[in-house]
Amino acid sequence: MLLFLEALLWGIRFMLGAALFSFMNVVAWRLPQGKNPLSGRSFCPACGAELQAQDLVPVFSWLALRGRCRRCGAKIAVRYLLAELLGGALAVGCTLRFGAGLTLREGLFGMSWLALTALLACGLLFALALIDAKTQLLPDSLNLLLALCGLAGLLLRPAMWASSLTGALCVSVPMLLLCLVIPGAFGGGDIKLMAAAGLLLGWRHTLLAAFLAVLGGGGYGAYLLAKKLADRKDHFAFGPFLCTGIVIALLVGDPILQWYFRFFLTDLLPDL
């Protein structure tokens, strides 16, 4: 019985994350068009038919409909299913990282308040990455919500206030200064994104997130140059790499940093 209840609780967490990322998909589609993500029913982009409740169950609806609209039979892109699976996986990851909450005082949906805050931040980062990849813009409204997640995390972990405030500045300020020296080096949205994320991450994990973003973005840029898909004057969206680095640092930053310091200080610098 206990095993069944535990499995049910993990299922609820997974479905919560899947539902959040399903909604963030809608946000990423509507917001750049100037539409309100909170108003109006979801509909099929092919025939315009409003989706019913049975069409909106994360993961299961896509599988039951075999990736097609119930009315017109048009294909529903597999990215919707993948987004929901990613959201479910991140909900599980946030719970493992930040703890469960089995009472209302501890949290909700079997997740601690800090785990829920981290999951919401991951959802916002997902929407930001999708929007930036398409438009090369990072909406201020989503960056503001991410900053509010950081403030909520600070209230839940007041001992981290110094690290959080330093995290908000340690990458965003150098990015801003670099933009003053090299116009267009970074977009204003990128700078605001790192300031907002730094509140939640703290300075160590913010530096790690920036490093991972530069590593991924640099590799992608080198690929584009090698394949002659772009030249040195072209720009590409850096936000998705920042968002990915932030999520990685948020969930597994501690083991990465522990490995890094152990490898470099113990193996490469044994005399220190």
Image (cartoon, rainbow, N blue to C red):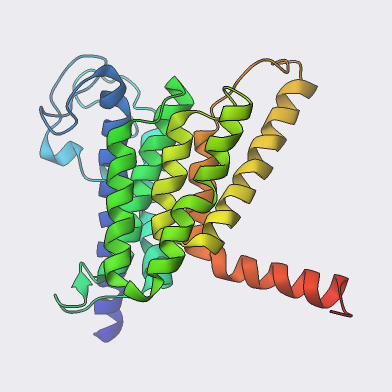
In this view, 45 is above or below 141: above
Between 59 and 139, the residue placed more toward the observer is 139
Q: Which residue is drawn at 48% across and 27% down?
A: 133
In this view, 63 is above or below 232: below
In this view, 134 is above or below 17: above
Tell me residue 50's x, y (percent): 12, 25
Side of 37 relative to 84 (left or right): left
Query: Which quadrant holds the C terminus?
Result: bottom right
Between 126 and 160, the residue placed more toward the observer is 160
Side of 201 relative to 123 (left or right): right
The picture quadrant where one finds residue 132 is: top left
Query: Which quadrant holds the N terminus?
Result: bottom left
The picture quadrant where one finds residue 236 is: top right
Residue 101 visible in the picture: yes
Tell me residue 120's x, y (percent): 30, 53
Side of 211 relative to 117 (left or right): right
The picture quadrant where one finds residue 96 is: bottom left
Q: Residue at x 62, y 49 (%)?
A: 212
Q: Residue furthest bottom?
A: 2
Residue 64 visible in the picture: no
Side of 272 relative to 97 (left or right): right
Tell me residue 63's x, y (percent): 33, 41
